[in-house]
Amino acid sequence: MKKNTSDLLSELKKCDSFGTFYNNNQLQFTETNVGQYLNSLVERKNLKKSAVIKSSELSEIYGYQIFSGIRRPDRSKLLPIVLAMHLTVEETQELFKACGYSMLYAKDPRDSAIIFAIEHGLTVSKTNELLTKYGFAAIG
């Protein structure tokens, strides 16, 4: 039976041994395969993987490695794919949550620029121009 997050956290706080907790709860942990999640989004949104990878401005090899699950990109490397797929902010937050990444936070200046880019349909290049204009690290 799946435990909810609150129950799992409560149990974790009370345990004396992480090893025991870990062994007793291995089926409770979520480990989303980024590639599988992205492939399901591509299918649901009726997109072509090759077009998404090209639009993401990532190298073709690296892009296909992400989609095949060979590579697990960090949050910043996943953002070009988000923009290329024209995900909404809500879809992006769900993707990040499912993959264990921190969600975009409007009070963080770099994240707010990224939210702006997503909302306004900016390309990866235009997003990077915006980010560097304000002294933030580029994506991708």
Image: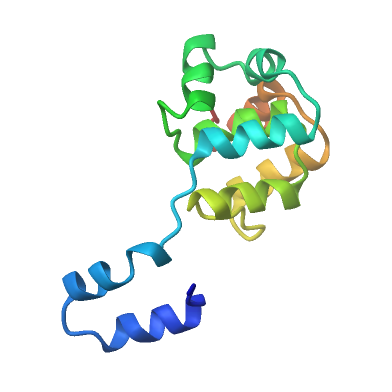
- Residue 65 in picture, x, y percent from top left: 46, 20
Res. 133 in view? no
Q: Nearer the viewer, residue 60 or 68?
A: 68
- Residue 57 in picture, x, y percent from top left: 61, 16
Q: Nearer the viewer, residue 124 or 30?
A: 30
Kindly identify the residue that appears in the image at 48 percent across and 41 percent down: 33
- Point out the residue furthest to the front here: 1
- Residue 134 in picture, x, y percent from top left: 61, 37
Q: Tell whether 89 sits left or right of 138.
A: right
Q: Which colour scheme appears in the figure? A: rainbow
Kindly identify the residue that appears in the image at 41 percent across and 28 percent down: 71
- Point out the residue furthest to the bottom here: 14
Q: How many marks?
A: 0
Res. 59 in view? yes
Image height of 59 relative to 45, above or below: above
Q: Nearer the viewer, residue 106 or 66?
A: 66
Res 70 quadrant in image: top left
Kindly identify the residue that appears in the image at 69 percent across and 17 percent down: 55
- Residue 1 in picture, x, y percent from top left: 48, 74
Kindly identify the residue that appears in the image at 45 percent across and 33 percent down: 73
